[in-house]
Each structure stands twice: as structure tokens, then as C-alpha cells.
Amino acid sequence: MALLEVKDIHTYYGNIHALKGVSFEVDSGEIIALIGSNGAGKTTTLRTISGLMAPREGSVTYDGEEISRMRADLLVSKGISMVPEGRGVFAKLTVEENLDMGAYIRRDGAIKDDLKSAYSLFPRLEERRKQFAGTLSGGEQQMLAIARALMSKPRLLLLDEPSMGLAPVLVDGVFETVQRIASEGVTILLVEQNAHMALQIADRGYVLQSGEVAISDTAANLQQNETVQKTYLGID
Amino acid sequence: MDVLRSRTSRDVLSLGLLSGAFILFTGAVGMVAAFHEREVVDRFISLGQLMLLTAPFVTAYFAAGRLREQGESAPRMLVAGVAVGLLTALPSVILLLFNSDEYRFLLFMTLRLAPLVAASVIAWGRLRAGAEMQTAIGIWLLVAVLVGIVTYSFALIFEVKGDLRSVFVNIDRDWVEVVTFDNRKDLMRGIGALGLVSIVSGLGGSILYLLPTVPRRALIYGLGVTALIGAFGETARLILQENVDRDTLREIFRRDTLRQNAALALFVISTAAGFFWALFGSQARERFSNLDYGPRRAVNTVGFVLFVLLMLMLPWLIGRTLSDVAVTIGIFVLMGLGLNIAIGLAGLLDLGYVTNYAVGAYILAVLTSIGPLGLFKGTFTFWTVIPIALLAAMFAGFIFAVPVLRMRGDYLAIATLGFGEIIGKLAISDWLKPLIGGAQGVQAIPKPIFLGTELKNPEQLYYIVLAASLVTLFVSIRLNNSRTGRQWMAIREDEDVATAMGIDTARAKLLAFTLSAATGGVAGAIFAAKVGTVFPNSFTVFISINVLSLIIVGGIASNPGIVVGAIVLIGMPELLREFSEFRFLLYGALLILMMIKRPQGLIPSKIVTHEAQSGVKPALAAAE
Ligand SMILES: Nc1ncnc2c1ncn2[C@@H]1O[C@H](COP(=O)(O)OP(=O)(O)OP(=O)(O)O)[C@@H](O)[C@H]1O
Ligand SMILES: [Mg+2]
């Protein structure tokens, strides 16, 4: 059974019909890429899954449970964690305080250890523990946002454009990290503009177009798909 | 003409005229004459005269600084000082001439010529900028007519009424007396005196700037302290009278005025102190920061203990009147620390804070009053009611928070503002009149009794406020460094992301409003006990605004800042009482100055400091 099953969801911003019946599945342990051009509805999809928005129609099932009407903060304790678009670090909290906020739902004693493993994943962050997050570089903020999302020990990690605005060297690093996280058993739903990189690490992928799923296939096939090559990979 | 074009002369010209405008303005609103009544040093200098001196002095000092930046030489700085002095006197001199019988014709001449001159200057400028002759003539006519209408009507008024006072009511005999340094009868002599004093002060200012660092700092310190103590004579005497005997006091003060010898002694002593500090202060600071952790901690601890001792002894040191002010300040510290939870930590712009204050005050009033409205006629004491007032305010905070939980920023501000108004109306309403007395309020609230003594003096009530403030301060500091506090900060930064961290934002906001209300209730209860009566008109929107302002002036989200903000914002108007009707003018001017000089607050929190340095948006944007 799929870990996450999105079925025919319709999500609106007021009168704006942003998602027009999106359906897809994510199995446990997979990396799923969600690609699409600007305004296709990728962020809206993630916001709907994470509970920040409720779909008007359709259902979202997580671990066998219907969650589309559940409050976002409760979903975190069920194991869904999100790295929001544009990083969304708390600029006026320090790096360490940001990480502690990531572990907000946890009251156990292992937080200290997880802090250590976050720092071993991103040594840069350890050097800047006491620095205000707003003063980090863009790349460091992205690292922090990912590390923070991991602090809640998620089973499903939603990543919204983790490579946005990063230098090519850093982009490679971010995707490597995503792979490493996946190898530790975390299921990943990855939204990306950088379709090329996303499809390289993903198992399967979905192409979103104007609020609808246009194509769905394995990552390898998508890379060969003509439309995908033309529109998203820039290959003529 | 070229001299005027250089940057240096333009700076001197504008600074000098600014200082002249200041003198003229303060004179025109009647401040100079009113302050002349108040002597700073007995039979030597009045506050009004001190103002006339200070303006060119300070301006010349700064002008010299500007000149130094532009690499000008010392003699030119002295010349600039003289120029500033002259320019300061100039507007007042013109007004004096216009106001005198002999030279009034100058006024009429100016008024008649002004439109022609103004029109010609503007038209000429246009011509030089390449306008057609026809356009220039059109502009000339237009300006001449427009300016003419104004100046000719003024001329008409003056002609009919006979003098300037019909328009400038405060440009009267008293004013002339002050600015001419008592030479009203002989105008030329008076103008000479004013010019001379201005020039000498301006020169003094630039000389001061040229002095080497140590004597300069010492003199600034000495002059400043003497002038301040002289100006705030009443306050100084109040503090002193607690600590010295009557005869000594009489040696120092004649009523509220420093005697000449005392002023001289004060000046010498404070200059000497300034001298030593300028000489050894930085060394001492350096030595302190070079200390090891152990000894430095010891010094800090000693400092803290001394501070606590000072706080404990304060009422004895400052006497009754000022203790009363201290109690009011304490009440506002309580409210400031409370509101800071909502505004500073959680970013919830609550403009209805007065609600909690009113709830606390009325709860205490109704439960303890021995008057007709008292419910229990003295069975309940102050001490049992304080926790009740606290809980009641928290409850009110909770109830009012529920409907506004989903609102953000400006909308929240408006909604809470509305709640504050509702409370005011409820308090005065007929509906609640049987319970809380409507406009008459609740009377006969007994003072707190502690171990058999009635705490009826401000000196005694001070300790209640001190204790409450210390507890609140402690809780605030703990909150700042806890997950609860950080969860609020996370919401302040980004509500959506905070939710995505698993924070129940609705619950967290409710908690912020509720806790924030608690100290407001205690503050209200203490206020009610202090005053003994509770009236609806004590609970206006100005309480909310004051509490908000003290947080902003002190430094948002900064606990020490809030304490200092309360001292400045609540204490200052009390001290400025000596300046009678000009109190709020000065108060407003000082606030504006403070916000220009330190927009991040007097003691900004760490976070805001880094913001101000990196040029990110200022404090309140975060509370939005
Ligand atoms: N707050 C909002 N109010 C109204 N319309 C919105 C809002 N947010 C998004 N939309 C609209 O919904 C549609 C989907 O937006 P969404 O942010 O999901 O796109 P996206 O695929 O994430 O794009 P990008 O790659 O540029 O981030 C767009 O047409 C957008 O204009
Ligand atoms: Mg997006």
C-alpha cells in the first residue's frame, strides 16, 4: 500500500482554481519528483498535502488515513515534514534555535543526539550555531531548512525547490544530501524546477501542468520522454 | 557670491539659521518668556536666557565638527562660530526692529517689497534656466500677485492693529525684555547685547570643539550636569532634602533655584569628575575587559548587588514625591513587560491592552472597597485579590483573543483597539452602573496592609511594585530563553512555517494573549489600591498607546529596554512638570529626537541590533 495517496484533489485560492484534480502516489522508501513550470501548482500541491490548505474535493491518504481535513500542526507528529519554498528559516532565531523549533513536537531526550547528526550532515551549520539564521548565506539557509525539517524525524519529507537560487556546486551537494536522507529510509516528495537533477535521483516522476498531472512515469522514462526533454530539460 | 556657494559656508549658513529659527520659534510660542521666570542659577541666569545661550553654543560646536570633516583650519572654525552666533541672533533682531515704534517702517517696507523681490528672483531664475521672456513675465506677475495678497493683508492687519502682537501674541514686552537682556528701553543697546551674547556663545562652542579631548569632555560634562541640575532644580531639591539637613539645603538652594556658589561648586566638581573619567575611564574599562572570567564575574556580581541595594533604598533616597513617580513607572514596567509578550515575542500588535488594566483595577475595587459598591466590605484583602485580579485579567485576555485569533497585522490592531474602546464604554455605561458606579467609579478602596501596617505612602507601595516587577522580569527572561518563547518568535517570523513545524498557532497565540494580560491585571489592581478610587476615565486608549510607546522607545523585545523605556516615557513628563504648559511640547520633541537618533530603541535587544546594523527592516515591521 502506498504511503501517500493523493486522489483527484481540487484546491482553490478564493476563486482561483489552482489544482484541477491532481492524483498520484508515493510508496514507502521512494523518491518522487514533481516537476512543472512556474505556476503549475507544485507548491499548492505540497501545501495541500501538509495541511496548510484544504482541498475542496478529493482526498489525501497517508498511511491508510484520510488527512486532507487535518490540521497542519498535527500532521507533523504523524511524520510529515516540509521544507517550504524559499527556505522559510526563522531569520531572528539562531541556527540552533531553528533546529530546536524543528523538533518542536518532540519531548524526548534524543533531541541532543539528533542535533549532533544534523551537524554532521551539515558541518557548516555547526560553525554558525549561534548566528541568526537571517544572516546565513542562501545556501546555508537551505541547509538549515532541510536539517530543521529532519529534526521532527519524518517518514515523509516534502521538499519545495531545494535547489532554488543555489550555485551549481551547491546544487549537487543538496541533491546528494537528499539521496543520503532517502537512503536512511525517509520517503521523499521532491518539487523541482531543476528537472534534470531531480529525475536523476528520483525513482518516479510526475509532470504537473496548469493544475493537472500531464505525464507520469518512471524517472528513467521521463528523461527520455520527448515533451519532457523539450519543455523541462531544455533538449531540442 | 562664490563664498556662499562653498559647501562649508552653506553648512554654516543653514545651521546658523536653524538655530536662529529655534530661538524665534520658542519665543513665538511663549517659551522663552515663560522660562525666564524660572531661574537656573539664582540671580545669574534664567532658563529662558540659558536657551538663548545654548542654541548658538551647541550649534557652533556641531558646525565646527562639520568643518573639521571638510578639512577646514582652526581659525576658520572660530569664524564659523562667530557666524553661527550672528545668524542665531539675526531673526530675533529683525523681529525686534519690526516690533519697535521707530523702526516699524522697516516692517512695512519689507512687506511691500517682498512680493516684488520674490517675483523677480524666481522669474530671473526661470529666464536663466532657458525660459521664454513671455513665460518669465507671466511667472513674475503670478508670484507678485500671490505673495502680494499675503504680505499686503499682513501689512493691513498690522497697520490697523498697530503692532505685531495681533498676529504673534507672544512677541510681547516680556519677550523683548528677555532677548534684549533687560534693555527694552534702549533698543539698539538691547540688540547689541543679544548679538554679543550670541556671538560669544557661538565662539565658545567652536572653542570648546577645538580643545583637546580630555578638557573638552570634562567641560561638556561639567556644563551639562550644572545646566541639568539647575534646570531640574525642583527635582534635585526633592532628592536632596531627603538626605541633607535643612540648613545645608538652604545653602544650596533658594527655593527651587541653585545658589551661585552652589552652582559654581557643582560645576567645578562635575568638571573635575569628568576630567578624571575622561583621563582614566577608558583605561578602567580596558582593564576590566582584560580581567579573567572569575574576577570579572565578581565585579559584575558586586555591581548587581549594589543595584539591588539601590533599588531597595530608593524611596529613602528620593523622597515621597519621586517615590510616587517611581510607583507609576513600576506599574507601567509591569504592563510593558506583559504587552511585550504579545507584541515583542509573538508579534501580535495588541492595541487594547488597557482592557486588562481596567479589569484588574475594577476587580480590586469591587472586591475590597469599603464603600457602598464594595461587595465584601473589607473581608477580602489586597493580597487575596491580587491573584484574583491576575486570573480575571488572564480570563479577559483569553476571551478577547478568541475572536481575533485568525486576524493578522493591521486588522488585529484595529480589532483590539475596538476592544479597548468597548471596555471604556462598558465602564461608564448605565448597564454596569449598579456594579461599578458608572462615571462616579468605585471609591473607598483601602490600602494594602502588611504585617499590621497600612501601606499608604508611595514609599511603601513602591515595594509592592518592585516585587511584582522583579517577578515579572524573572518570568520574562525565562520565557525569552524557552521553547514557549521561541514558539512565539517563530509565529512572529512566519506563521505558516511555524505551523509546518507542528506548532499549534491558535493555541500559542491564545497563550500569548492570556499571559500578556496577567501583568496588566496586577498593574491595574496596584493602581487602584494606590489611588483609592477607580474612575472610567483612567482607562483610555492612551494607556494602551503609552505602553506600546514605552516598548518601542525602550527597545522591542528587550527586557532592560522596557524598564528604561518606562522610566523615560512615564518619568520624563513628571520631571518636565517644571516646564508647565510646555511640558508636552518638549516631551514630543524629545520623543521625536529619540526615535530619529535611536530607532531601534534605547536598549535594543540583540536581534534588533544586528538588524539595524545590517540595514534590514526596523523593529516594528516584525510585530506586523
Ligand atoms: N496566495 C495565492 N492567491 C491566489 N493565487 C495563488 C496564490 N498562490 C498561488 N496562486 C496561484 O496558484 C497557481 C499555482 O501556484 P503554485 O505556487 O502552486 O505554483 P508552482 O508550481 O509552485 O510554481 P513555481 O514553480 O513558480 O513555484 C498559480 O497560478 C498561482 O498564481
Ligand atoms: Mg512553487
Image (cartoon, rainbow, N blue to C red):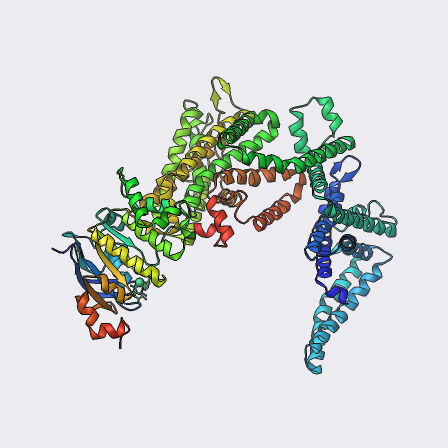
Q: Quadrant of ligand 1?
A: bottom left
Horizontal arrangement in the rendering, residue B190 relative to residue B559 (left or right): right
Which residue occupies the foreground of this view, A134 or B117?
A: A134
Image: A81 above or below B524:
below
Using the rendered view, name the quadrant where residue A105 is placed: top left
Horizontal arrangement in the rendering, residue A188 relative to residue B288 (left or right): left
Place of residue B48 in the rendered image (x, y in percent of width and height, measured from the top left): 74, 44
Q: Quadrant of the C terminus of chain A?
A: bottom left
Farthest top residue?
B452
Which residue occupies the foreground of this view, B345 or B30?
A: B345
* Number of numbered discs overlaid on the protein picture: 0
State the residue at coordinates (44%, 41%). Answer: B339
State the residue at coordinates (31%, 56%). Answer: A84
Place of residue B502 in the rendered image (x, y in percent of width and height, measured from the top left): 28, 47
Q: Quadrant of the N terminus of chain A?
A: bottom left
Place of residue B152 in the rendered image (x, y in percent of width and height, measured from the top left): 75, 66
Which residue occupies the foreground of this view, B286 or A50?
A: B286
Horizontal arrangement in the rendering, residue B436 relative to residue A183 (left or right): right
